[in-house]
């Protein structure tokens, strides 16, 4: 451990020495602040590339462009070889004599533009439908992100990670709202599992907490490790390249999941956009089927939890009540969806005997409540609220809600409808001590024997907007 600490101290001294040297060397061309900014973005983590970066900046290249191409070079430098370097550059190869002799030396490339062919070459080598993504590899480290349960088992072999067991549910649970990344130390050793001939770390990265200090680390023995400790133990370039991958992966995910405002508007009865970019909306069941109204929510890269929400919309909401949705639709994260209801049961409570309900009472029930429905509706003007309540009335009346109440059998009369053991029956005959039901069976008639009486269909009566 002491040797490791001494090495880290020495590396820090060398890095700081390089920085001070570059500040002096480029004093006439770059400000000290510019040099330090380049140093902070040097992907080597020890200012290995700083001299070359300063030269490119002094020649007028954009900082982000330099960093982008240099990261590409740094991530793939160990994959450069005599076999592929000529094919990478093609006809340009003869104009770059230093590249031929030292392709892994950044100083062999006179311009940042010379790195572009390398970026293109290795981008095309990325697997399109792979079971895992190789994030980084050098002589010691291999970093992969398993995209399937099978890949998780393969790269997590000999570990105690639940995501690498035969139970796929664990893998599905961890990848539902996040990403798995495995760090394989090819020169590491686990004395408890010598057959592995390697040591591994797993990290789970929540899509809502992608900063490296929030990563959830696990040892090969499946023991949780403090994230700050891991960030200090592992080489900085490994963290940087993984962080870059996570941002790009999430960016693609968000790009496919984000829902344009005009699409929300077209598929909503009413919606509201707040200052922090949260959309609150109600699906328009009046003109669209449930499937059509939610089709725009289904995106190919959405996590499984989001698609479960879509399935819930399709199968449950229309019978449970009128749904409204709070959608956090930010460009920096996957849309977060919460579903709430104007539940039919709220309206049913306003009538305990099947009699009609006034629309004014429905409005009071919704607005006087402490739930999210009240929070939602106060955002709209009187005209929008009127349209909303009329729609609620129309949909409730179409749903043909029947009220029920437990009553004694002695209070029943011929023609009354009752529910017995889940079966809807009619009272056919009333005697002094019994009832004859439509299924031919008799029921004892007394005060203590109770059944569920089914009243007629309850309707909402419009007493608010008589002109409609």
Image (cartoon, grey):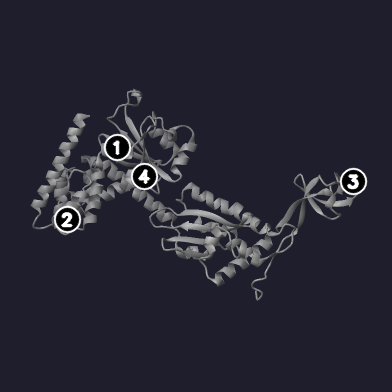
* Quadrant in the rendering for residue 213: top left
Mark 2: few, some, or many residues within 10 Å (few <14, many ≥20)? some
Task: Single out the mark in the foreground, 1 or 4.
Answer: 1
Query: What residue is pinned by disc 4?
Result: 127
Q: How far is the residue under mark 3 from the one under mark 4?
A: 80 Å
Mark 3: few, some, or many residues within 10 Å (few <14, many ≥20)? few
Mark 4: few, some, or many residues within 10 Å (few <14, many ≥20)? few
Q: How far is the residue under mark 3 from the one under mark 1?
A: 81 Å
Give yes or no for contact between labels 3 and 4 (Cβ–Cβ under 8 Å): no
Give yes or no for contact between labels 1 and 2 (Cβ–Cβ under 8 Å): no
Sooner in the amino-acid sequence: mark 3 or mark 1: 1
Query: What residue is pinned by disc 2?
Result: 34
Give yes or no for contact between labels 3 and 2 (Cβ–Cβ under 8 Å): no
Sooner in the amino-acid sequence: mark 3 or mark 2: 2
Query: What residue is pinned by disc 3?
Result: 433
Q: Residue at coordinates 12% horizontally, 44% vertically from top-left?
A: 17
- Can see residue 233? yes
Residue 93 placement, left or right of 458:
left
Q: In terms of secondary structure, where does tag 4 sit?
A: loop
Q: Residue at coordinates 34% horizontally, 50% vertically from top-left?
A: 247
Provide residue 54's location: percent of width, then percent of height. 15, 53
Mark 1: few, some, or many residues within 10 Å (few <14, many ≥20)? few
Query: What residue is pinned by disc 1?
Result: 229
Q: In terms of secondary structure, where does tag 3 sit?
A: loop
Relative to the observer, which residue lies in front, 225 or 256? 225
Q: How far is the residue under mark 1 from the one under mark 2?
A: 30 Å
Provide residue 119's location: percent of width, then percent of height. 26, 49
Q: Quadrant of the C terminus?
A: bottom right
């Amino acid at each position: 451990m002491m040797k490791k600490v001494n090495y880290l101290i020495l590396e820090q001294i060398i890095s700081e020495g390089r920085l001070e040297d570059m500040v002096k060397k480029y004093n006439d061309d770059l400000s000290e602040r510019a040099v330090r900014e380049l140093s902070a973005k040097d992907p080597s983590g020890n200012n290995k590339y700083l001299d070359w970066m300063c030269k490119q900046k002094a020649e007028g290249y954009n900082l982000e462009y330099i960093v982008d191409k240099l990261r590409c070079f740094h991530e793939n430098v160990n994959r450069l070889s005599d076999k592929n370097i000529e094919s990478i550059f093609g006809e340009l190869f003869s104009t770059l004599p230093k590249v031929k002799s030292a392709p892994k030396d950044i100083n062999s490339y006179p311009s940042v533009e010379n790195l572009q062919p390398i970026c293109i070459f290795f981008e095309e080598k990325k697997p399109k439908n792979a079971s895992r993504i190789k994030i980084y590899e050098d002589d010691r480290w291999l970093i992969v992100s398993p995209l399937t349960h099978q890949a998780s088992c393969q790269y997590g072999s000999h570990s105690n990670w639940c995501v690498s067991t035969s139970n796929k549910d664990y893998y599905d649970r961890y990848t539902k709202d996040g990403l798995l990344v495995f760090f394989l130390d090819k020169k590491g050793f686990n004395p408890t599992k010598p057959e592995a001939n390697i040591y591994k770390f797993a990290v789970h990265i929540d899509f809502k907490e992608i900063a490296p200090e929030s990563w959830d680390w696990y040892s090969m023995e499946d023991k949780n490790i403090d994230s700050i400790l891991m960030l200090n133990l592992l080489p900085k370039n490994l963290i940087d390249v993984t962080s870059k991958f996570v941002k790009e992966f999430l960016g693609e995910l968000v790009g496919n999941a984000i829902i344009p405002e005009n699409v929300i508007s077209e598929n909503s009865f009413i919606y509201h956009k707040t200052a922090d970019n949260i959309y609150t909306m109600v699906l328009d069941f009046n003109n669209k089927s449930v499937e059509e109204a939610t089709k725009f929510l289904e995106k190919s890269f959405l996590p499984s939890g989001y698609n479960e929400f879509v399935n819930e919309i399709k199968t449950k909401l229309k019978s449970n009540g009128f749904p409204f949705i709070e959608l956090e639709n930010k460009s920096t994260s996957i849309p977060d969806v919460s579903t709430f209801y104007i539940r039919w049961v709220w309206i049913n409570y306003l009538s305990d005997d099947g009699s009609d309900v006034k629309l004014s009472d429905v409005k009071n029930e919704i607005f006087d409540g402490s739930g999210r429905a009240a929070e939602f509706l106060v955002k709209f003007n009187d005209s929008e609220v009127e349209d909303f309540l009329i729609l609620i009335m129309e949909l409730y009346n179409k749903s043909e809600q029947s009220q029920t109440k437990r009553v004694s059998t002695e209070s029943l009369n011929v023609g009354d409808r009752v529910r017995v053991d889940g079966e809807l029956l009619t009272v056919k005959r009333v005697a002094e001590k019994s009832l004859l039901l439509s299924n031919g069976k008799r029921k004892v008639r007394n005060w203590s024997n109770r059944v569920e009486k089914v009243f007629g269909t309850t309707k909402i009566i419009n007493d608010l907007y008589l002109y409609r």
